[in-house]
Amino acid sequence: MKHTITLNVNGQKYTVDVEPQEKLLDVLRDKLDITSPKKGCEMGECGACTVIMNGKAVNSCLVLAVESQDAVITTVEALHADGKLHPLQQAFIDAGAVQCGFCTPGMIMSAKALLDTNPTPTEMEIKEAIAGNFCRCTGYKPIVDAIQSAAAVMKKEGA
Amino acid sequence: MPTFAYVCPPTLNDCLKLLKENPGAKPYAGGTDLMVKMRDHAVSPQMLVDLKKIDKLKGIREDAEGNIIIGALTTHAEISESPVVLEKYPFFAHACRWVGSQQIRNRGTIGGNICNGSPAAETLPSLYILDARIHLESISSTRTLPIREFFCGPGKTCILPGEIVTAVEIPNISVEFSGSYHRQGRRKVVCIAMVTAAAMWRQDETSPSGMRFSIALGSVAPTVVVAKNAENYLNECAVCSDDVIEHAAMTALKDASPISDIRTTCDYRNDLVYVLTKRCLKDIICGGRELK
């Protein structure tokens, strides 16, 4: 039986019909055309599908779309504003933290969820926050560097 | 994914009624285990009863007697950040932080972790040594079971059809105590543990050393096991010297019956039982990790 759900994705309200077994990841990608969350392992291990749901980083492959009724979802698509990249996006480019780019949207959303609650994380806290996001080509060093420098930029901008 | 009906009832009674009336229904909480099992067709429920609207299954509270009651829907992230858990039982908060990744901890619940019944579950050894009690409810009854009586095999629990876990209770400890948890996986994080171990002493004047010990081991038997031989040995010793810790850690091997599987070998698990038991005992006897 189809359910009609209303959810807020990147500040925009969507009403969409979903089957109970449809995953949030598939609805975002195939029905709402929001394709930054990537389909990787589909078992919550690789983190490529990470989105922020009601303020928390989650694997959208392990969330049923039907339970996102009234949820507030944020993906990378919402990060840039006024034609300017988010400090995390800019830092990933500057640090060379993007190679093939498949893990990047999930990695950035995990980093954003961390910085939203902990604006000055330690290196260990960054590593813990992105432990559920696998990168198989860039390497984690530039990614951790990028998150650290984004945190510094955001602190400066906020000050 | 198999097809199923989805309901998200507003009250616990509605949930319990649906679970009783539909034998093919399954309760749904964080979904971090169930979604993967459904994807692999290992389970194919006809109906998912989403419990997430039931506020009484959420959150952590301390009652007047100092017992901590953790609602079944409380996530691992919430437990690991809970001020009351961090203050009273830091090793249990620490164990919850070992579960999966941040994304998994944000969704996965303590009730789900328990009902999943994995002998490798990060939360269980600590709950064993804390003598946790599992609160269960069905449409017609409520009951409480000691966690040590809750599991009957890998992935198997004593939960009856139509019943759900509503909370986990950690009974207050009114004497001095110290606890510790260690685990070893194939990599540092986001992996299922090869062996887990938790140990604790509580002040007990009837014991020669003034301390009564509890030790639980995970991923070395069909369920988490209490290391009775090691406990008995420690409970008879008057002094907890390095030699005694060494012997107790060796004795813990008698309590484990590990197998070789996809994660590691039986021999390595035995080595880990010794090492992790020793680490836990050193923590609690030498007064905590920072003093090492």
Image (spheres, coloured by chain):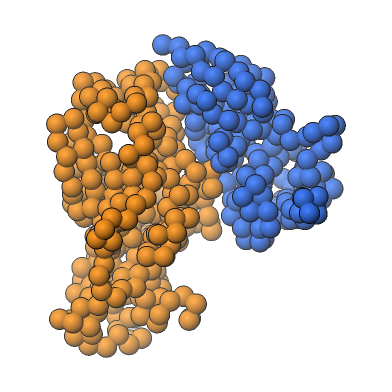
**Residue B175 locus on image (x, y percent):** 25, 74
> Chain A is which colour?
blue
Supply the letter of whichever chain is orange.
Answer: B
Residue A13 image position (x, y, % from top left):
62, 20
Q: Is residue B19 visible in the rendered structure shown here?
A: no
| Residue B89 in view (yes/no) | yes
Relative vertical location of residue B197 with respect to residue B176 in this rendering, above or below: above
Q: Residue at x 45, y 49 (%)?
A: B78
How many numbered discs, if any?
0
Residue visible at 37% across and 64% down in the picture:
B89
Name the quadrant of the N terminus of chain A.
Answer: top left
For the point 32% across and 31% down, which residue is it?
Answer: B27
Relative height, residue B94 to residue B204 (above, below): above
Q: Quadrant of residue B198?
A: bottom left
The percent coordinates of residue B112 (x first, y second) are 35, 41
Image location of residue A151, percent across then percent down: 74, 53
- Quadrant for residue B37, please give it: top left
Q: Give the quarter of the figure containing the C terminus of chain A.
A: bottom right
* Vertical position of residue B222 compared to residue B237: above or below: above
Residue at 33% over, 60% down: B126
Task: Answer with left or right where residue A68 lies relative to residue B167.
Answer: right
